[in-house]
Amino acid sequence: MARAVILGTGSGAPARVVTNRDLEARMDTSDAWITQRTGIRERRMGGDAVKWSDFMVPACRAALDAAGVAAEDLDMIVAGTLTSDKRMPSGGCTLQTLLGARKAVGFDLAAACSGFIYGLTVADRFIRLEPRLKVLVVGGEVISQRIDWDDRTTAVLFGDGGGAAVLTGTDDPDRGILASRIHSDGDLWDLLYIPAGGSEMPPGREQDPRRDHAIHMRGNELFRVAVRSMADVCAEVLDEAGVDPSDVDIVVPHQANLRILQAVAQRFSIPEDRVFVNIDRYGNTSAGTIPLALDEAVRAGRVSRGDVVLMPVFGGGLTWGATLVRW
Ligand code: UT7
């Protein structure tokens, strides 16, 4: 049976860097607290001067170049995002027109941080059915516009950025997506959510527009669920593929908190040097973290043909999932 293979990756982020010191000047926090509790040193923040497509289009073009695929040959664009340029059309349709992917179908997956892994899973299932398909999967956010600057427990965590991957089918039994699983638990919605913008609180009904459109999070509880759910879904994809954790060459995890990544790796006795970390430079870019980190890992020569790559994620919904690839 054909497998989905990743042909190329790309990434992008706004140019403006906001350091922990910059945040110290803005709220009651410290570089020491942020670094020790999260591993974050700086993040990119476009703020109101940047829109999603400004950095996602270059990310997609870089992925298409690396894959050697022309935009007009794409069949599908799957966008994991909550912050594309407009409420309508979808980010997938916006990318379709900006890239000139005339014959593709573009659509979005609203899975918060898990958007890219949800997208890889959808692409994997389509490609298994139709191996000739060329699919662009993207994940990225402009989270700096969704921050309540009076809430230091969330404001220090997030940043803007994202990335993309081009996939198609292969008959090569030694390559491709070995397993990809996604889950959700809507009962836990209030651990991480944005109150306004839907039909429950439509435009004009906000009490405090800035705050109601911002991320609300119960970080402590989320931390525990995150470690447990990511570890469980890693075990699930490793079992399904018959891969031993010691055979994982690199983990490219959701970058939400350095301590969460370390805890998940410890569950499987995966040494820290096999976990790719860039949270220090980008913070949590939600659906952007995995494609951004994957692209950096690939371009840094950390991922070679034949390597086993494990990508676990969790996020608002709650949603979680993992994709296991032999590169
Ligand atoms: O993509 C998914 C998104 N979210 C996550 O993955 C978040 C998961 N959770 C976490 O990463 C962590 O729970 C946080 C980083 C959010 C918080 O770290 P923590 O070690 O769980 O800290 P805490 O919430 O237990 O707070 C410890 C202390 C509190 O002070 P007191 O009550 O001990 O006096 C907080 O008020 O740290 C205080 N605090 C801060 N201090 C300085 C909370 N935020 C800050 C801050 N600067 N930014």
Image: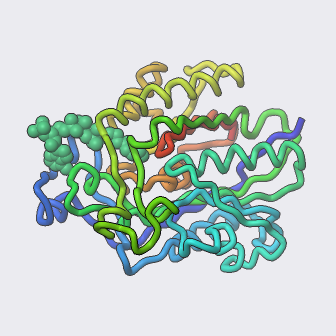
Q: Is residue 247 above or below residue 110?
A: above
Q: Is residue 98 above or below residue 194?
A: below
Regarding residue 192, the answer to whether it shows in the image is yes
> Which of the 4 quarters of the picture holds residue 107?
bottom right
Residue closest to the eye, 275 or 186: 186
Residue closest to the eye, 68 or 214: 214
Regarding residue 38, the answer to whether it shows in the image is no
Q: How many marks?
A: 0
Residue 4 is left or right of residue 306, and the answer is right
Residue 168 is left or right of residue 268, and the answer is right
Question: Residue drawn at (36%, 55%), measured in percent from left and top?
Answer: 215
Q: Is residue 85 above or below residue 312?
A: below
Q: Position of residue 240 (x, y in %)?
A: 70, 23
Question: Residue drawn at (57%, 37%), measured in percent from left and top?
Answer: 184
Give the colour scheme shown: rainbow
Residue closest to the eye, 187 or 105: 187
State the quadrant of the C terminus. Answer: top right
Q: Position of residue 72 (x, y in %)?
A: 80, 74
Question: Residue drawn at (85%, 39%), measured in percent from left and top?
Answer: 172
Question: Residue drawn at (46%, 53%), measured in percent from left and top?
Answer: 286
Q: Position of residue 230 (x, y in %)?
A: 50, 31
State the quadrant of the N terminus. Answer: top right
Q: Position of residue 46 (x, y in %)?
A: 37, 73
Quadrant containing ligand 1 reads top left
